[in-house]
Image: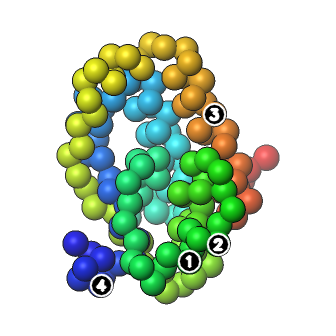
Amino acid sequence: NPIINKTADVVIPRRADNVFKASYPVEQYHSETFANHYINNLLGRETVNQLDVYFGPFLFSPKRSNLWLRYDGDLWDAQILPWINALINAKDLRVEAVEIEYRHPVNQQKEEEGDILYCQKRLLQLMNIIPKIHSLVSPKTFK
């Protein structure tokens, strides 16, 4: 564990793509894959230690807890924006991705796949997080 070994301050699990693609609703796989590529490009991490930004669980060192305690968010941004802000502004923050083979529950995949309400939730997630990330780091060619 990079937190215990003190080689990272924040560890973000990254879903193994083959298991992610096979076990998640197709709409969620595509929306989160797109968002992850986009955000990694913004952060200059497209080819190095890619972060699975939209995967929920993550670990952080207790010495970094203030990043989340000071953040005033109310949705997914409350989890994601604190470490992105620190990654951009704190040169000493060490963020590491660790690949895991998480398999989504089959009954959840079946319930959500093809359901317009879940499609709308995926769209809301994109529309909630991406503009807030843009407030921290703007794409150079964004028009």
- Residue highlighted by disc 3: 124
Residue visible at 28% across and 34% down? 104
Residue visible at 25% across and 55% down? 99
Furthest-right residue in this view: 143
Q: Give me the disc on residue 6.
A: 4
| 58 relative to 61, above or below | above
Disc 1 and disc 2: Cα gap in Å? Answer: 6 Å
Residue type beneath disc 3: Leu
Crowding at mark 4 (Cα within 10 Å: few <14, some 14-19, many 20+): few
Residue type beneath disc 2: Arg
Answer left or right for 23 relative to 75: left
- Residue highlighted by disc 1: 66
Disc 3 and disc 2: Cα gap in Å? Answer: 24 Å
The answer to which of 59 and 122 lies nearer the viewer is 59
Using the rendered image of the protein, determine whether residue 42 is visible from the camera's viewpoint: no
Crowding at mark 2 (Cα within 10 Å: few <14, some 14-19, many 20+): few
Crowding at mark 1 (Cα within 10 Å: few <14, some 14-19, many 20+): few
Residue type beneath disc 1: Asn
| 80 relative to 103, above or below | below
Could you tell me if the residues under marks 1 and 2 are in contact, i.e. CB atoms within 8 Å? yes
